[in-house]
Every structure is written in C-alpha cells, then in structure tokens.
Image: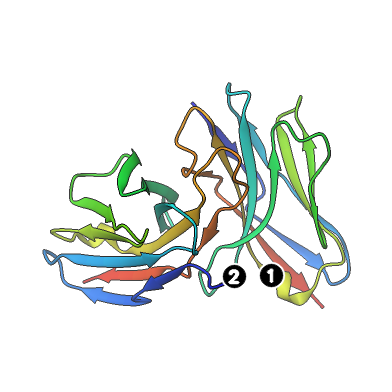
Amino acid sequence: AQKITQTQPGMFVQEKEAVTLDCTYDTSDPSYGLFWYKQPSSGEMIFLIYQGSYDQQNATEGRYSLNFQKARKSANLVISASQLGDSAMYFCAMRVSTDSWGKLQFGAGTQVVVTP
Amino acid sequence: KAGVTQTPRYLIKTRGQQVTLSCSPISGHRSVSWYQQTPGQGLQFLFEYFSETQRNKGNFPGRFSGRQFSNSRSEMNVSTLELGDSALYLCASSLGARQSTEAFFGQGTRLTVV
C-alpha cells in the first residue's frame, strides 16, 4: 500500500525567510510521481511542483524547489524568500504506475503562516 | 488556456436529496478525477474517468457515482445525501498518461448538507 506522511501540522515563518516542508512516502512501485500543492483559504488547489521517480535532478519552479532523496523516500518542499501570500495549506501527493495515473494520494497537509 | 472549471461553487442541500456537480477539464486533458475533502478525513480519492470510462474508484458507497462525456466534461452525483457528505469536492484534470506531469485542480464545489 502507498502512504504519504506530512509530520508538520503547522508552522510559522518570517517573511523573506526560507521554509522547508517535510514529506515522506512509502511505495514499492519503482515508477511514481510526487506533487506539491498549495491550498489557500479560498479552497483552490494550486499545483506547485512535480518530481518523477526517475528524474535525475531535483525539480525547481521559481521560488519552489523539491529536495528529492529517493533512498530515504523523502520529497521535501523548499520555499525560498517567503512572502505573505505563501500563507496556505500545503499538500504533498503521490501517484504510482501500478494504479491509474489520474489517482493521487495526499498527505494530511502542513499549514504555513508567513508573518511580517 | 482556460483552467479547470467546477460548477456550482456552493451548494446547500437537505438530507435525502441528491446533487450533481460538474467539472470541465483543461482542453486536451482526458482524465478527470474527483476528490472529497473534509477536516476529519482530509483529501480522499473518489473516482477517475478517462475517455468516458471509469478507470478507478475509491472506497466510497454506491451513492457516489460519476460519468464523463465525449468532450471530457465530467459530472458526479451523490444520491440520498447524508450530513457527512458535507465537504469540498475537488476535480482534477490531467492528460492521464504515464508521461504526464500535470494534474490541475478546479476551485471546488463546497457542498453543505443540512
């Protein structure tokens, strides 16, 4: 069975600082994809970044980067230079090739509050 | 290009009624997945449709059903509503192929059952 674990229920970060959100996963499937989403209070899930299990390099998208440590089965999200607008719930998600490719399994999420 | 569109955004229904939610995926995306989000259970997968066929189904009772049309638009239906069905229902759109790195969500439909 697959499992996604986010151990940080919430965290505060000061504006302009970097923050790391933890995500560990468990799967026996060698082919999988990992996603990070941001969910503001409005409810919309905003796609941030994707990492494939066979990708050689860590994914980056603007201020977001993914610290992918395959042997440790971790896929931590790093947000550099935090902004007030980064305050939101952040979800890590995984899909595996042995399941239909449109199915995502989510972690419990981490609530991030950015303070001035 | 246009994003994923879910309608309606908000719904209030009474126990025992049924409800239909709609999702229009991103143009060219053939996979539509539905999720239920509640404070207690988090985000749970309901089902996925690909090219008008249900490709996968989560662990939900038969009261929850869906379909997909030839233009990839999808609907989900919940019959005999219960208070516990109150949730944010999210639809995700993707190419549905192994190589796809995209999975984009709509703004969701917030259903309240009273």
Could you say which is closer to the camera, residue A94 or residue A83? A94
Whether residue B39 is visible to the viewer of this picture, yes or no, is yes
Q: Is residue B5 above or below residue A33?
A: below
Q: Amino acid at mark 1?
A: Ser
Spatial CA distance of label 1 from label 2 is 7 Å
Residue underneath mark 1: A87
Chain on which label 1 sits: A
| Horizontal arrangement in the rendering, residue B16 relative to residue B60 (left or right) | left
Q: Is label 1 in a helix, a strand or a loop? A: loop
Asked whether B95 or A61 is in front, the reply is B95
Q: Quadrant of residue A107?
A: top right
- Give B47 or B59, whichever is nearer the viewer: B47
Label at residue A40: 2
Q: Is residue B27 above or below residue A92?
A: below
Assess whether mark 2 and mark 1 are in contact (beta carbons under 8 angstroms).
yes
Q: Secondary structure at mark 2?
A: loop
Place of residue A64 in the rendered image (x, y in percent of width and height, measured from the top left) = 79, 57
Q: Residue at x 31, y 39 (%)?
A: B59
Q: Is any part of residue B57 visible from this angle?
A: no
Please tell me which residue is depicted at 18% across the width and 51% down the height of the picture: B63
Give the quadrant of the C terminus of chain A.
bottom right
> For the residue marked with disc 2, what is the amino acid?
Pro
Q: Tell me the crowding category of disc 1: few under 14, some 14 to 19, or many 20 or more residues within 10 angstroms, Cα based.
A: many
Instruction: Please provide percent x and percent y for residue B88.
Output: 39, 64
Residue B87 locus on image (x, y percent): 35, 63
Eyeballing the image, is B54 above or below B68? Answer: above
State the residue at coordinates (76%, 35%). A55
| Left or right: A10, with B89 as reference point | right
Q: Is the residue A100 above or below the residue B28 in the image?
A: above
Q: Earlier in the sequence, mark 1 or mark 2?
A: 2
